[in-house]
Structures are given as C-alpha cells and as structure tokens.
Image (cartoon, grey):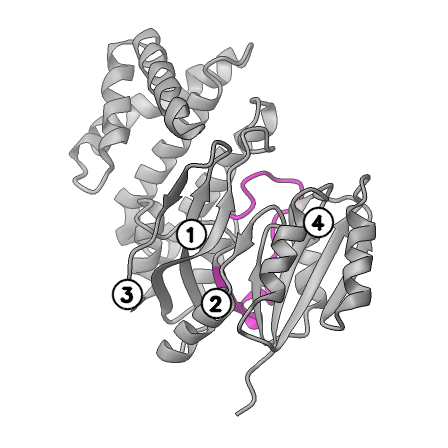
Amino acid sequence: MMIPMISVILPVYNIQKYLPKCMDSLFRQTYTNLELILVDDGSTDQSGTICDNYKESDKRIKVIHKKNGGLSDARNAGIESAQGEFITCIDPDDYVDDDYISYLFELISKYNTKMSIAQHRVHYDNGTIKDMGSSGDEELDPERCLERLLYHDVIDTSAWGKLYHKSLFSDVKYPKGKLFEDIGTTYKLIMQCDRVAIGYESKYNYVFHNNSIVNGVFNIKKFDLLEMTDEMGKNVLKKYPTLKEAVLRRRVYARISTLNQMLNAKGYEKERKDIIRFIKKYKNDILKNPKAPFRDKGALVLLTVSYRAYKFCWLHYQKKIMTKEKI
C-alpha cells in the first residue's frame, strides 16, 4: 500500500549554525515519502545558500526564497505550497528522532484521526536534557485535549511535535507579525478534529536558546502572549463553555509568565499594574481550582503579600533554576 506524502515545513532565518543538524535528522527519517520545504525568510547570513545546496543534493527538497515576514509568514508560505496529504512543522534550530514522522503517522493510522501529537525533550545550553515523555498512547476528543492544553498537562501549543492533515489549514493561518503565534493557531486545529491521537514518547528535540526572540530580553512584542491567550480563551469558550475554569487558569498563567519576564524591565509601569490587577481579581478562583498547578497558586499568594516579595522570591527561584538548567 502506498504511504501518503508528508510535507515537512522548516521556516529558515539566519540559522546557518543549526540547520545542518536539523537536516541530518530529517535525512535519517524512517518514513521515506517526504517533501522537505525550506522557507528562506529573507536570511542575511548563508542560510539561503545552504538551503539551495541541500536542494541540489536531494530531489525531495523544495526551497522558497521570500522577503522577510516573520515566522508565521514563513510557515504559511510553506504550508500553502505543500503537496503532501499531511504536514509537520519543525524549527530548524531543533532536530528530531529518526522515527519522528513514522511515530506520528502510526498514531494517526492507529486511531484514524487528522492530527497526532508527540512529546519532546528540552536541551539546555549547559548540556542538561529534560525529557517530557513517558510511554503509551491514546485518543482524546477535542474538548478533553483542549482542557489538558489549557492546564499545560503534557499537551502544549507548539506548532512542532505534531502531524496535521493538510485540510485542517484550509481556513487557518498563523498570525503574521505576532510572537507566540502557535498559541493563536494550535487550538483552532484541534477544534476541527473529531479526535486527536496522543503519543507519550518523546520524539522531538527542542533546543532552548537563552537569547532567542521569545526567551531573550523583554520587549513590547511579548505582550502578544496576552492577546493570543485571551483570543484563544474567547474562542474556546464559544464552543466549550464547560472549560471556563481551564480558560481562566490559562489567562492568569499568561499574565504570571509575562510578569516574570518583565521583572527587570524598565518602564511598563501601567502594563505591570494592569497585569497584577487582573491576577488578583481572579486569585480566589485559581486557588479553589484543584487542577491549577501549585506554582500558579504560590505566585498568587506571594503577590497578595506584595509585589516586592513576589519579585524577590521569583528572581531567587529563577537564579537557582538557571544554575541547574540554564532556564
């Protein structure tokens, strides 16, 4: 039986240092009917040339050179040109296990779904590896899948680590010009499915960079997290009003996360006060929620004491974690 073509989308921008390791992992895939789409998003280093060299050596590779438009724009361009029945997204500074695509496709075949999810490992700059996986697999209805996503319960919003039927993208685009674009997209793909196949083995290797756009110094674009999360919450509640507590938890978490990132940032006093006001407003709801993570609740208690106490404790905790894992 002929296996379907799977299109692999790689948005490439000034990533010449990491691209070879990612590509090597794709050349080793046990799933062979692949289309590898490298979208050069206006790179100013040698990334574009490296992409062209790969194209010359492997007929499965397609290269798109375009004006810089950001990660979402590059992903959208790759998906639009994809010829495969299924699509998976990979960030070119990451890499995947040899059976990454086979594993995801086998999950879809086993449960007859349009989407499957695998787990990942986090690789830190100091060599520490945090494996998020375990074993086994199952299928979930979209409501249960979204609930677990909202609570950060194994399922996350990342574009990578997932396999999608191309039809899911018919009316869904990654939001151009936004950080945290996957938060504004993944839930929409899940909501189109009757069921989602979940695999608990780690097959994707996420390389954590301290100086990346998302993890680096705070800037105003990081407030996109709040916009993307609130929009997700609003749309989820339209279809699944029973997820009210989970949505609220995720909205509060997004503000705790943003507050943590801006603790040492100068300015943004109004935004900081608005965030703290929102968190305190829903403090009791989160404290009463048995599914809300303990760390969320600890942050709420500290903020009730004072912002100064919260900042001191979080920076101390962050320093301790960074010493161990370079987070």
State how far apart marks 2 and 1 are (Cα).
13 Å
State how far apart marks 2 and 4 are (Cα).
23 Å
Label 1 sits on a secondary structure element that is strand
Seen at 25% across and 15% down, the residue is 304
State how far apart marks 3 and 1 are (Cα).
14 Å
Residue under label 4: 12
- Residue 48 magenta: no
**Residue 287, quarter of the rendered image:** top left
In-front residue for pair 152/236 = 152
Count of marks overlaid on the render = 4
**Residue 256, quarter of the rendered image:** top left
Residues marked 4 and 1 touching at CB (< 8 Å): no
Label 2 sits on a secondary structure element that is loop
State how far apart marks 4 and 1 are (Cα).
21 Å
Of badges 2 and 1, the one in the foreground is: 2
Seen at 81% across and 59% down, the residue is 53
Say which label, 2 or 1, has the lower sequence index.
2
Secondary structure, magenta segment, majority class = loop
Q: Tell me which amino acid carries mark 1.
A: His
Does residue 317 appear to the left or right of 66 in the view shown?
Answer: left
State whether residue 3 is above or below residue 105. below
